[in-house]
Image (cartoon, rainbow, N blue to C red):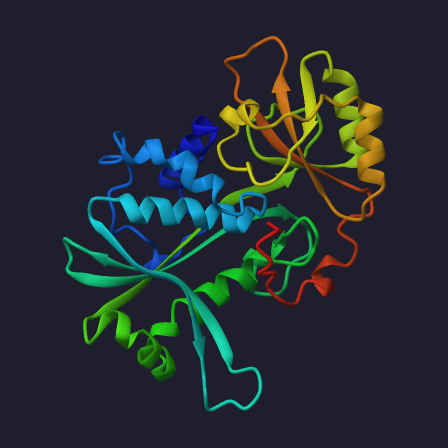
């Protein structure tokens, strides 16, 4: 299992954000495994096995926790800090801070929010919100909503008085800045018989027509969570059997949302594995009306 954890950690460190986070972009640490090659990586497997590695969000956060705990320029100070506004009689919880770490070179504290999301491109768009065309596979999330929450609420928590009082025992009077990471993949709608040189999602009808013509070249399997990051080592953990076209059609027809699959080239092992989504033909039914809030369930994408 070490190779999949290691490759996912590499992906996390090297992958860019799926959208420009502007002044909140996290560029404070050297983005490589320097300092982790020896010793700490031997503990990576044991650390990850101790975590909930079946939920995508918590798996992703655990990788970040390990990285921040072992980075030579970091001292991880706190994680998952719940912020409550005691002036509110009902629903006092206003947020949670993912991580606070001490940056040794900059000599300041960093509040870091991390998120991993997978979105599919649809035609519907909210006026003046170009990011609203990216919708979650279950139509319970949208990129513009997540982006706005990350920029306007989550990274702004440190400015609130209740947050300052909560974290004072942790950081004292030291300065703190906020940064964010929003990684994942964006999937565009498949166009007939193009090369798989992008991340694509298919309607069921389009996939049936396309796969009928190329199934001699590819094998397809359902892609389990949480290993949606680095797909090159998926065989180390993915034990799902290869599916027939009939199997795939049945699986998708039984759902009302898009399902993830992995395509592997049968004859050319040097070609990278490809993650795709396949959705029922009626998807995304009224997705622009359905998606009104940000989905923060860490078991979803």
Residue ID at (25%, 44%): 71
User: Residue 217's x, y, as percent?
Assistant: 67, 13
Nearest the eye: 70 or 252 = 70
Nearest the eye: 287 or 117 = 117
- Residue 143 visible in the displayed image: yes
Residue ID at (27%, 30%): 37
Nearest the eye: 185 or 7 = 7
Q: Quadrant of residue 161?
A: bottom left
User: Residue 45's x, y, as percent?
Assistant: 42, 34
Q: Quadrant of residue 154?
A: bottom left
Residue ID at (63%, 67%): 293
Image-based side of 275 in relation to 286, left or right:
left
Image-based side of 95 in relation to 283, left or right:
left
Position of 52 relative to 171 (above/below): above
Position of 177 relative to 31 (above/below): below
Image-based side of 12 in relation to 205, left or right:
left
- Residue 183 visible in the displayed image: no
User: Residue 285's x, y, as percent?
Assistant: 79, 54
Position of 152 relative to 48 (above/below): below
User: Residue 275's x, y, as percent?
Assistant: 60, 32
Residue ID at (38%, 72%): 156
Nearest the eye: 153 or 73 = 73
Count the numbered circles shown: 0
């Amino acid at each position: 299992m070490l190779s999949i954890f290691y490759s996912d950690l590499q992906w996390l460190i090297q992958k860019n954000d799926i959208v420009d986070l502007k002044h909140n972009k996290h560029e404070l640490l050297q983005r490589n495994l320097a300092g982790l090659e020896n010793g700490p990586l031997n503990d990576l497997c044991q650390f990850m096995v101790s975590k909930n590695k079946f939920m995508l969000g918590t798996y992703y956060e655990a990788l970040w926790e390990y990285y921040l705990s072992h980075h030579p320029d970091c001292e991880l100070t706190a994680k998952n800090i719940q912020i409550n506004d005691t002036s509110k009689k009902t629903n006092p919880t206003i947020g949670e801070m993912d991580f606070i770490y001490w940056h040794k070179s900059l000599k300041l504290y960093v509040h870091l929010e991390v998120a991993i999301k997978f979105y599919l491109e649809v035609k519907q768009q909210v006026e003046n919100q170009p990011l609203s065309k990216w919708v979650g596979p279950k139509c319970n999330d949208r990129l513009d909503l997540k982006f706005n929450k990350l920029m306007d609420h989550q990274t702004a928590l440190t400015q609130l008085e209740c947050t300052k009082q909560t974290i004072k025992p942790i950081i004292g009077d030291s300065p703190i800045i906020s940064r964010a990471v929003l990684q994942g993949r964006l999937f565009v709608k498949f166009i007939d018989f193009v090369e798989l040189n992008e991340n694509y999602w298919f309607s069921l009808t389009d996939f049936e027509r396309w796969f009928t013509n190329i199934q001699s070249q590819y094998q397809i399997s359902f892609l389990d969570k949480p290993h949606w990051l680095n797909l090159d080592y998926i065989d180390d953990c993915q034990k799902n059997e290869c599916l027939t076209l009939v199997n795939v059609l049945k699986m998708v027809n039984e759902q009302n949302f898009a399902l993830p699959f992995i395509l592997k080239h049968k004859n050319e092992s040097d070609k990278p594995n490809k993650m795709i989504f396949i959705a029922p033909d009626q998807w995304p039914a009224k997705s622009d009306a359905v998606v009104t809030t940000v989905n923060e369930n860490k078991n979803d994408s």
